[in-house]
Structure formats: structure tokens, C-alpha cells
Image: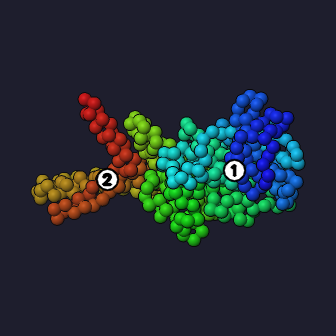
Amino acid sequence: MPDPPPHLRDDRYAITRLLGEGGQASTFEAVDKKNGTLVAVKRFQVRGAKSWKEVELAEREARVLASIAHPALPRYVEHFEEGGELFLVTEKIEGESLAELKKRGGRLSEADVIRMLAEASEALEYLHGRAPPLIHRDLKPSNVIRRPDGSFAFIDFGSVRDRMRPEGGSTVVGTFGYMAPEQFQGRAVPATDVYALGATALAMLTGSEPEELPHRGLRVDVRAALGGRVHPSLLRALEAMLEPDPDRRPARLGPLLADLRRRDRARADPGEARKSRTEARAEKRHRKRARRHARGRPLRVPGIVSAAFAIGLTVAQLAVILVMRVGLPILLHTLSLVFGRALREAAENVETAGKAAGEALRRAKNAVAGEEDAAAPEPPRIRVEPVAGESRVRVEPSDDEAEADAGAAEEAARRRLRG
């Protein structure tokens, strides 16, 4: 491809150097004499294009960039035709591409990868949230720029798809190793960009191309590739992003990064660490209650049947009270006056078991009646243990109580340290 003229657009743009070239276009750095800023000028040889598809992609990139505005994406300036060639002008994003960093042996730290994914998440939310969604389709290290301040930008929309079902089908575009499996079928969905970002993150953590890393079937073996070098939460996020099945792969990065953000806040601020642990415990309790509620959701039964069950459970409650909480404890306490401490302990164990049985029957009666009991605490667990040759009944706290006790103990320890 011959060099472009040194000046374009009636001497507005002065070409300074070549930034890169691909199969269908070349990108140059230029000075915009109108305001003295650096711009990137992408040149498409329309007359020499191998197919109309290349011309269509060039026009689509110009159209898409003209319609978007986001801090992590290049700002559109203009596009024009000159000398039988199409030129697209955008702001020149200062910094180094991840491909250049990788080429000279550099890698991204775990913190840098998390920041890149967080900023990519915001950019993709913007692109995928448009109507119709904009799918980049070619996210890879050469299309990610790390600015001098450490932030990231995402460039080169030459493969973007701005219609979910383009007329006449779709061309397979992308870069091997970073392409999601569905791209080989000419399909692209929001989860396609998530896969490419996962592959980019993995390449920058390992220093290797994705196709060079261990695989299990069609899946990149993230655990084998990283070898325990990153936090488990990041490992799980990358595994989810590189799921081969687009229907099982997340279409959004935000939920995957929530745990990572919590961990980073906790690392920076001990107060945030305590808050994060409290939030995690609350979330765990919420999930447990939701599971218990789902398992214990009452069946819809005829009124006569439910009334019969309720009467039967009420009778059982009374029997438990009379036998296990009144009759047997009184009898055993009386006998303990003659036979000693063993029967007194047996009386206490029977009474404890009676309380647990009564609570379980109460919850069962509420369930039969169709009443919500999600806010009620989880009943204690009863365990019979041999102690010095005897059987002892031990009441274990529920998970909710155990977590509350752990939080209280933690707070007490902090008070002692402060005191």
C-alpha cells in the first residue's frame, strides 16, 4: 500500500508516522493543524479493496464511531474521501498497546488486570446497551491501550457489528485465540466480547497466546495456565469469561467483578475489610434463607386436608410438651434423688430435645397452614455424643447463630485491642 499524501483535507492533517497496518487498512499519526492536537488517521483503499465487504466494514466503523462517546473509547473527529481512498479521523489515545507491552516481555499485574476488566465492563455496558447492541468482535492486546495514568482504552472498531442479524449473513472476523467459538459460525452476541476480554486478560497474565495455553477439550484450562498465581476470585471470573458455550457464558462483566472490587477495597482499608466480611456474611445468610424457603415452600392442598394435618400436628405438640418437657423430666428428676446425677442429666437432655421437637412441629404447622416463616431463625441441631462412656445430647447452634457469634467475637477482640 503506497504512502499517503503528507497533507490531507486541504492541509488540515499533517501525517507524521505509521502506527500500524492490517489486512484492509493502515493507521497513521497526524497533527490536526486546526487545534494542534494529535489524531489517528485510518486509511482504507476503497478502489483497491478485495471485496465490497471491506468497504462495508470501513463505512460501518465510521458510522459507529460517529454515534458513540465514552471516555474509554476513541473520540470521533470526522471521515472523508480523498484521492479514491476513505479516511477516518479519531483522537490519538496516548499510551502503549498491550501487544507492544507483551512483545517486549512485559505483563500485567493482577491489580492491572482487574482495573482493565472494570473499565472494559463500563465500556461494554455502554456499547451493548445501545439499540441495537454494538459488538466489538475483535478485542485483543493490540486493541487495548494503557494510558500513562494507568487507565485503559479500547480501540479499532473495524470489526464492529451494529446489527444483530445483518442482511446477507455475517463474515467471520476476529483474531484466532481471542475469538469466541460462536464467531467461527459468524455469530456475535454481547458474551462474545466478554470471551475476548477474558482471553486478553489471560494472555497478559501469562505472557502467552491463548492457543498456546493448556486446554481441556474446547475450554482453556485457566487453572493450569495460571498455576495458583492469582486470587481464586479472579480465577473464577476468568473461567466464567472463557466458557465456550455462549449460552452459559456471562453477557456482562459487572456481576463477576463485584467480589474482586470488594477484595480490593478490603486490602486498601481495614475498615472496608470488616465491612466486606459483614456484607459477605449477610449475603451468605440471605442465600441460605432463600434456599430453605425454596425447599420448604408449602404445597397447595385442599382446606380439609390441611386442617386435618394442622390438628394432628397440634396434638403432637401437646404430646411432646406433656411427655418430653413435663412427664419424663419430672420422673427422671425424682428418680435422680435415689440413683444420682446420671438421671438428672438425662432429664435435662430429654427436656432440651423436647424444646427442639416442639419448635420443629411449630414450623411444620406453619408450613401446612401456608404461613411464611422465612424470618424465623434456623432451629438448633441436636447431636448425641458419647462422653466418658455416656450418651450426651448436645445442641449445636444454627448457622445464623454461629455467624452472629463469630461477628460478636470479632468485634469484642477489636475492642480489647483498642483498649
- Return the residue found at the far bottom: 217
Q: Are marks 1 and 2 in contact (CB under 8 Å)?
A: no
Q: What residue appears at the point 35 percent right and 41 percent down from the top-left corner? A: 407
Q: Quadrant of residue 9?
A: top right
User: Label for residue 298?
Assistant: none
Q: CA distance from mark 1 to mark 2?
A: 67 Å
Is 41 situated above or below 197?
above
Determine whether 400 is above or below 186 in the image. above
Q: Considering the numbered disc 2 on the image, is that residue within a helix, a strand or a loop?
A: strand
At a point 45% along the width and 47% down the height, the residue shown is 285
Q: Quadrant of residue 87?
A: top right
From the viewer's perspective, is residue 396 above or below residue 129? below
Q: Secondary structure at mark 1?
A: strand
User: Given the image, on which type of amino acid does mark 2 rest?
Assistant: Glu
**Quadrant (top left/top right/bottom left/bottom right) for the N terminus:** bottom right
Give coordinates of residue 377: x percent, y percent. Answer: 42, 46
Image quarter in which the C terminus is found: top left
Q: What x and y, as percent, mark residue 373? A: 49, 47
Q: Which residue sits at x=28%, y=30%?
A: 418
The residue where tag 2 is placed is 396
Tell me, for residue 20, which label it has, or none: 1
Compared across the picture, whether 408 is left or right of 62 comes to: left
The percent position of residue 57, horizontal first and vertical second, equals 80, 53
Q: Identify which residue, 262 or 400, lies in the foreground.
A: 262
